[in-house]
Image: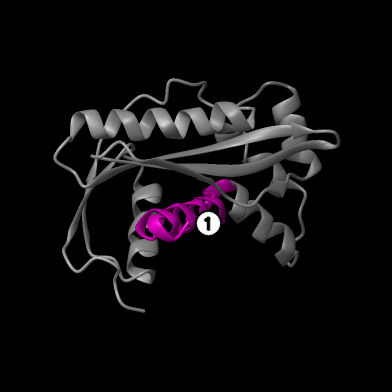
Amino acid sequence: MKSTYQKKLKIAVGTTSDPKIKYLKEVLQNLKIKADLTPLEVKSGVSEQPKTTNETQQGSINRAKGAFEKFPKSDFSIGIEVGYHKEENGYEMFCWVTIIDKDGYQISSQSHKFFLPKYYQEVLNKGLEMSVNLEGYMKNIKAKNYSKKHIDEIVRHRKPFIENALKNALIQYLNKEDF
């Protein structure tokens, strides 16, 4: 796959999170996009643990806007926000990514959703912060339960959600005239 852009892009990123930056670099490499990233500390403008789809999307928009304001010479900015949404049977986890460019074009993309296991449902229902309450899930799991270990990795690191939303948003943005 050839890069859509032959020049090296300047991308402002509305986060300083090492894992999010790492996942973005991996997605860019996978899509064969050359870019210089400028991670920036910006406010999401939403709660630390967004609990609705709309709030999570708004957090990604706010992060992209904040990054672009701090680095207006970028080709575009990216905002990444992971959140939860309570459906009829419980909470699902997902990610929203927003891209905003210097022409004012904006696109947001949501990742796939993942229905959280009972332990994580209880954490969210009690109003506790997920990031500091991850250890309890693995306490009663036998060493050879690989599927539960995999679920723990997914929820702990959020990689599949972030990568999915990033890839979808970047593909749509870089091919926007086709959409």
Q: Nearer the viewer, residue 13 or 156?
A: 13
Residue at point 77% right, 45% down?
117
Residue at point 68% right, 21% down?
127
Q: Position of residue 168 (x, y in %)?
A: 49, 56
The reply, left or right, for residue 75 in relation to residue 90 is left
Q: Position of residue 152 (x, y in %)?
A: 65, 52
Residue at point 51% right, 54% down?
159
Mark 1 element type: helix
- Residue under pointer 1: 164
Indicate whether residue 160 is drawn in magenta: yes
Residue at the limit of the structure toward the right, as seen here? 89
Let me know if residue 69 appears in the view.
yes
Looking at the rendering, which quadrant does residue 22 occupy?
bottom left
Let me know if residue 41 appears in the view.
no
Three-letter code for the amino acid on which mark 1 is drawn: Asn
The reply, left or right, for residue 63 in relation to residue 89 is left
Q: Position of residue 141 (x, y in %)?
A: 76, 54
Q: Nearer the viewer, residue 15 or 112?
A: 112
Instruction: Name the magenta segment's main secondary structure.
Output: helix
Looking at the rendering, which quadrant does residue 105 occupy?
top left
Identify whether 164 is placed above or below 129: below
The reply, left or right, for residue 61 in relation to residue 54 is left
Identify the magenta region.
156-179
Dot 1 alpha-carbon crowd within 10 angstroms: few under 14, some 14 to 19, many 20 or more: many
Q: Nearer the viewer, residue 82 or 111?
A: 111
Indicate whether residue 82 is drawn in magenta: no
